Each structure stands twice: as C-alpha cells, then as structure tokens.
Amino acid sequence: MATTLQPRTLRPAPEPLGNFIRPGYNDHTVLAQALTEGRGSGSGLIINPVHSERQMPLVVEANTAGVETILDSKSLELSSPSGYVLRGISDLPWAAEGGMHSPLNLANAAGARSVRSLAEYAAEAQMSAVLAPTHFLNSPTSPWWDIDATLTRSLRGMLDELELTQAPIYYPVMVKASSLTNPAMMTRLMSQLQSVPVDAVWLRLHPFGTGNSGPLVLKRYLQLARQLHALGIPVVAEHSGSVGVALLAFGAVGGIESGVTFTDTVNLDGLLRQPRPDNKPFSPPPRVYLHQLGAFVEASVAREFFAKRGMKALHGCQDTNCCPRGWSDMVGNPRRHFLRQRAREVAELTAMPESLRPGHYMENFLRPASDRAMRSADQEPSLARVRKRLDSWRGTLGADLEEHSSFTISPPAAGRRIRVRPSA
C-alpha cells in the first residue's frame, strides 16, 4: 500500500539584515558590475547627489534588482563650515538661499521650500528612500531638535503628495557619543524619535567605527542601541565598518553602512571646524580587505604581507567566485573582494536564528581572527593594533554575553515603511 506523503510547512525565510553601501567617487563601475551579476551590491546604495552624473545610472539598475536607492540629503555638509565649501554642496537644489543651513534660514517657509526641492529631486531620480535632513546635535536644548522634527514631518507630507507613499524616511542621529550619557540628552532623543514619521534610526555617533571602538565605547553603543529598540523600528550603524558586523551579530542593529573599503569610522571634526585654505579633497586608492581579520591595509602593504611565508595560505581569499586567483585578485580588484566578503558576512548572520548569531560570531570569526592576528602581527607590524582591537572586542562582547542571557533585537533594516504615523 502506497504511503501518502503529508505536506510539510516550510519555515519562512528570515528578513534580510541591512548591508548599505555608500559609493565613493570612483566606485560606480564595480557596483554596476555587482548589480548586473546579482551579488555583492549590498541591500541598499546611498546615493550622493553631488556625484549624480556618475551614480544615477546605478539607481536604475538597483531599482530593477530590488536594491534600495537612498538619497543622501547632505544635511550635515549643508550646515557645517567645512562641509558647505565642498564642491557641489552649495549647488544642491535644496541648499538655502541665505548660505549655509542654520535654524534661522530653515525656519517657516524657507524650510518648506528646501524640503519640497529635496522631495522633488527624490521623485525625479526615482529614489526608493531618503535620509532625513537632520543636523548635528550638541545639547538637549539645541534649536536643531525642533527644526529637524518639522523638516522630517514636512518631508513625509511632500513624498506622499508626490506619490512616494511607500518610500521610507531614515533618520540620521548625529551626536557626540559621550553626550548621550547625559540623561536629558537621551530623554530628548527618545521623545524626538517617537514624534516623527520615520522608518529607521541611522546612528552616526562621533567618534565611532572600526578604529574607534574601544571597550567603553563599544559597550556604550550596545546600551544605546538597546534603548532605541523600544521604538520598534530598525537601528542602522552608519560608518561602522567591521565592528558593525559585531553589532549585527549581537542584535544591537538591524543594518550597517560603510563605504567601499573606506568610510568605516565616524569622525565629524573635519566637517564641523572651519575649513583650511589648503584643504583639497582627493580620492585615495582602495584598500585591501583582510576578511579573516576584518581589517584593511594599503595595497603596497598587502603585496609585501602576502610575500611573507604562510600569509597567502592564512589570509588569501579561498572563494573562487570572489577571487579566482586568490590573494592576487584581492590586491588587484580590492573593491570587488570587499563587497562580496561583506555581503557574505551579513548573509551568514541573516541565515542564522537570532539567538545563535552572537555565539556564531564569537566562535567562527572573532576567536579565530584574534588568534590569526597574533601570528600576522609578527609578519606585519601595522597589524599589531588590529590584534589589540580584536582582543578588546573579544573581551567586551564575551562579557556582554555573560551579563545578558537574553537581550532585545533590532528589527532588520528591510527597506520598507515601518511606521505609518508617529506614535501619540
């Protein structure tokens, strides 16, 4: 007698964690290739309107591929001394008529006109999301709190009017990390975020990132992110680099953002101070990603490093879909190698149950990485600081696991409207 097969219920695929890429001036070609191949492009691209001629073709391909296209409002640059003088910033359609953005020249009708220009640009360029025009906050009484709330509400209304009702608004929080130890500052932040129609919080804490993530700073970041989970919307770590992967694993954030081998650290000093007369921006060559360590080195250093005994086997890319010629492709095409390895790191965590992600990260990356770094630092002295950094993360995150048998988890940054209206 034939056995009747019973239908099986399939477990739904987990929502993807966010892997947002901020293309630099020379990154459009490798990202276009990644989009056409369907791998390594991340879950979203932050589009710089100053580089529109180079980056706008990415928007069409990304939208077709289901990759988010997020318009950077450049609000920090428009409102900071060194940012405003950068090429193309003052020419943006939503730049204020009175010069550098300030609470005074963004009040009332002038602010509304600026936001309308921003929303119309997003609609015309077919962006799928917008970074809200928020500003650097240095105290709980800063006039920017009320201005930012008004601009964000106005942006939501303008996008809806332009039939972009499904376009998320992501809210950058740009503050000094130390300021959030002030209870008044944290209370104001939570109240602000509950009052505006936003779909994710993007943290740009100064200073923070792969190179600025000592034990106290990392612990503070974990605590802050878990407080923000009460909002019920995703938290994204801006400019976080490799430490962002750790934050993803521990559920502190639902997405991470960085540039292509650069922009993995937040340091706002250069924008907030007065511009230097001899300050000329330039695009440095891409760095080589040593994915086994979550660290970057200059290409010249990488060539010497791989020439030393045992380093090809220890750190060379073994993924033939990424680097068919191993370490030489890592050095020869560092942008592609980084994009594919970062995508792999995020995809591995996405595929795992939330409760298993911290242990997986500790045992399958952090512990072996710190062990590898000890041997590698003997061959390349500049990696000594990487070894110290990994050991510090290992201690801090290990203690966090011991302290918390369970902790709250940020929703994944899935690129969809989360909050239709602000809570009362």
Image: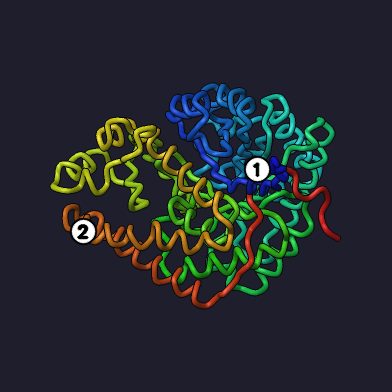
**Does residue 291 appear in this view?**
yes
- Disc 2, disc 1: CB below 8 Å? no
Give the left or right position of residue 100, taking residue 394 as reference.
right
Q: Which residue is mark 2?
A: 375
List x then y, in percent, for residue 65: 60, 28
The residue at 39%/57% (across/down) is 365
Pointer 2 or 1: first along the chain: 1
Which quadrant would residue 46 be assigned to in this image? top right
For label 2, the crowd category at 10 Å Cα-Cα, with few meaning under 14, some 14 to 19 and many 20 or more, is some
SS type, badge 1: strand
List x then y, in percent, for residue 392: 37, 68
Q: CA distance from mark 2 to mark 1?
A: 42 Å
**Does residue 174 appear in this view?**
no
- Amino acid of disc 2: Arg
Which quadrant would the N terminus be assigned to in this image? top right
Q: Is residue 399 depicted above or below 156 in this figure?
A: below
Q: Which residue is mark 1?
A: 131
Colour pattern of the rendering: rainbow
The residue at 39%/32% (across/down) is 321
